[in-house]
Amino acid sequence: MVQPSSSQPRQSTSNPTTLAGLIAALVVTLFVYFQVFLFLREGTANPWIIFIVSLLWGIGGIWLLFTLVTSIVDLLPSKYRQGIMPWVFAAPAILLVFYYLLIPTFRTFWLSLLDAKSDKFVGLDNYIFAFTSPAMLESFKNNLIWIIFGGGLSVALGLLIAALSDRTRPSFEVSVKTLVFLPMAISMVGAAVIWKLVYQYSPAGASQIGLLNSIGTTLGASPIPFMITRSINTYLLVIILIWMQTGFALVVFAAAIKGLPSELLEAARIDGATELQSFFKITIPYIQVTIISVSTTIVISTLKVFDIVFGMTGGNYGTQVIANEQYTQMFRSFDYGRGAAVAMVLLIAVLPVVYFNVRDFGKEAKGF
């Protein structure tokens, strides 16, 4: 007698009563789950009770919901089960994205069409402000500087150091990568505090606690008020980003270069290619996808840059950026309409970069 193969699709052995009971249990569980959520949101109970209920609600509740849903799907005919089951696993992530990303985005867009107190509809007035006000025009110019110099130099230096360190002794390579990557362990605000001590200025004749001015005055130069000098202050702030992001680019590029087949480089050397030619015609094309991914990630970071500017100058002296202008409108001027409009402008600026990155990942996946 031939035993049925385990690889054959399972046949549904459900009956309507079992399926209806599971669906009813799921509905009751969702109702109870929501009521517990409301209870926890109030936060008026004893902290220990809230703690215990949170554990039961977060772990046990999710497990129960998942068990009920998978049980319901398992009772469906095979042709439906195979199409629905992947969505069971993807549904929590989709719901979280919808609740924490899409809904706030639509709400922000609606707020951007209202006045400062969100009482009256003003149409596109806030967007007119976002594209015509001197503060926003200055922000656009500065963000462009951050992208070109901050993003460009971070990627270029990371790639250069990764390529050079790959040709050194392993012990020296580890030391270089550690030193360059170390700033990544520091928060943006922490980096602002550190570099504030580097750029600190005191009047001539006073004791200079800023590193650069201390060195300069020791050599006989006059102290320079770096952060209030409009011609250089934005570029000096960009240096902080380069100091932090080069380590990220270095680590990713170094891993990609390690994956480069040595046979390709050896063949290039046999054909008479120089190290520079091998780098530009073999290494860079091979890690092109990685370069694009790192570049888009850093560009998004530069578009959203806030902490460094806020911690160093507060956006004064011509250093204002888009994210800092949003903060200014929302939490200093209390103009929620303009603040929301600036936030939407920032989102619109980031979307093309994200789309380009996702499209590139799609091409790479099709290539495999």
Image (cartoon, rainbow, N blue to C red):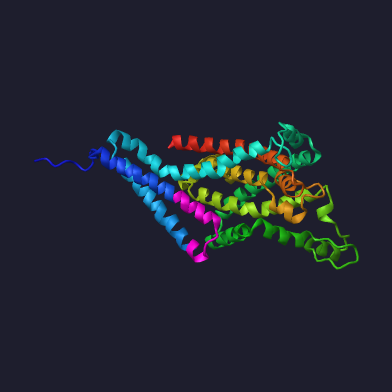
User: Which of 266/240 is in front?
Assistant: 240
Task: Judge whether 268 appears above or below 314 on screen.
Answer: above
Q: Point out the residue furthest to the bottom here.
A: 207
The quadrant of the image that shows the N terminus is top left
Q: Is 142 on the left-hand or right-hand side of 155?
A: right
Magenta region: 33-50
Provide residue 257's location: percent of width, then percent of height. 52, 48
Provide residue 237's location: percent of width, then percent of height. 74, 52
Task: Judge whether 356 appears above or below 275 on screen.
Answer: above
What residue is drawn where x is 47% and y is 51%? 35
Q: Is residue 104 at least partly visible in the picture? A: yes
What residue is drawn where x is 49% and y is 61%? 50
Q: Is residue 277 at least partly visible in the picture? A: no
Provide residue 128's location: percent of width, then percent of height. 75, 33
Q: Point out the residue furthest to the right here.
A: 205
Q: Is residue 46 magenta?
A: yes
User: Which of 275/192 is in front?
Assistant: 192
Provide residue 104's location: percent of width, then percent of height. 59, 42
Task: Judge whether 219 appears above or below 13 on screen.
Answer: below
Q: Point out the residue furthest to the left here.
A: 1
What residue is drawn where x is 86% and y is 68%? 207
